Amino acid sequence: MLPRLPALPTYPWDTLAEHRARAQAHPDGIVDLSIGTPVDPVPAIIQTALSAAADSPGYPLTHGTPALRAAAVGWLARRHDVTGLDPGAVLPTIGSKEFIAWLPRLLGLGPGDLVVIPELAYPTYDVGARLAGADVLAADSLTAIGPRRVALLWLNSPSNPTGQVLPAEHLRKVVGWARERDVIVASDECYLELGWEDTPVSVLHASVSGGDHTNLLAVHSLSKRSNMAGYRAGLVAGDPALIARLLEVRRHAGMMVPAPVQAAMAAALHDDDHADIQRTRYAARRVALTAAVTAAGFRTEQSAGGLYLWMTRDEDCLASVAALAELGILVAPGAFYGPRGSRHVRVALTATDERVRSAVRRLSDAVG
């Protein structure tokens, strides 16, 4: 008899099959805005670095090469004004989702431990806690947590799904609260380079941390910044003691980023030009889609950063999904991300320019 697995929710995107089929039946084909998977080419500088490191017969370093860790420190300092970070306090991960899902277990959490996640949240925060057997509380305010003992608290700014950007003042308050209670704060910063109306700040920034990274972990991904989702290229940085503990467990478990991918990551982190080009692409798609959905009667909310539009027309989210599927446009129901999203949908900016233009035309035609 197989051992019982932790109770896991249905994989959200499996529930969209009917709506996907409807959208695919559109004469001009589907415009899939439901998942934030990159569609633009991997920059040549990254492909070249990967190819140059292809002859890698030995096992890669779990801790990452010194070149990769130095590149990560340099990138965080150059682009996000994070200072005082030692290269030893950086650890590459097999994409950010893998790390998010396994962090509670890597930290040794289990039954009786409490993990706090945002009320509207990337589903993997919840899944990671479940895999560890820990309890989960969805709460956006510290007062809602009350006197309960918290082991791990997740932050996400810019947010997936809403695009909300948390100001430094709020992040500093959370960090202060956590330090008084010896709580580990993990900040998912995968969209940190995609601030639009607001400028995102890392939890490791001195304005938040006071220059002390104790009990802080910042999680980053090159999937969106550098179109490297297929490479599974992520990293975590922060508290040297926590990174050392995570490194020890990951070495035993064989959680290693392939050496050619590490070389590609270093090249990506050293180069800002390709990231700026990609950001410009997303900005243009965001402007076009925002205008089209607004004309179609939707209202965007909170989307000051990130890779998505969080929008509503004050109806059940599945009604909005169905209506857009009739136009051949597939979006994600807000309920995927928590009960508070039941009247919203999430629209990804990750479609080609041609597909975005097609979506804009369809929305305009529907309005008449």
Image (tube, rainbow, N blue to C red):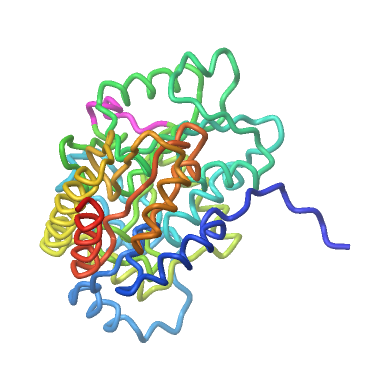
Determine if the magenta segment contains residue 212. yes
Relative depth, front residue between 83 and 121: 121
Is residue 89 in view from this perspective?
A: no
Expressed as whole percent of the image width and height from the top left, the position of residue 177 reads 42, 18
Relative depth, front residue between 356 and 150: 356
Q: Is residue 193 visible?
A: yes
Which image quarter is the N terminus in? bottom right
Residue at the (43%, 20%) spot, across then down: 141
Rendered image quadrant of residue 28? bottom left
Viewer-closest of 102 and 9: 9
Task: Classify residue 13 as left or right of residue 299.
Answer: right
The picture places residue 263, in percent across and down from the top left corner, at 30, 71
Relative to the observer, which residue lies in front, 313 or 163? Answer: 313
Point 60% across, 33% down: residue: 136
The image shows residue 94, relative to residue 111, as above or below, that is below
Q: How many numbered tags mark residues here? A: 0
* Image coords of residue 82 (percent x, y): 22, 40
Query: Is residue 315 rendered to the left or right of residue 264?
Result: right
Bounds of the magenta span? Answer: 206-214
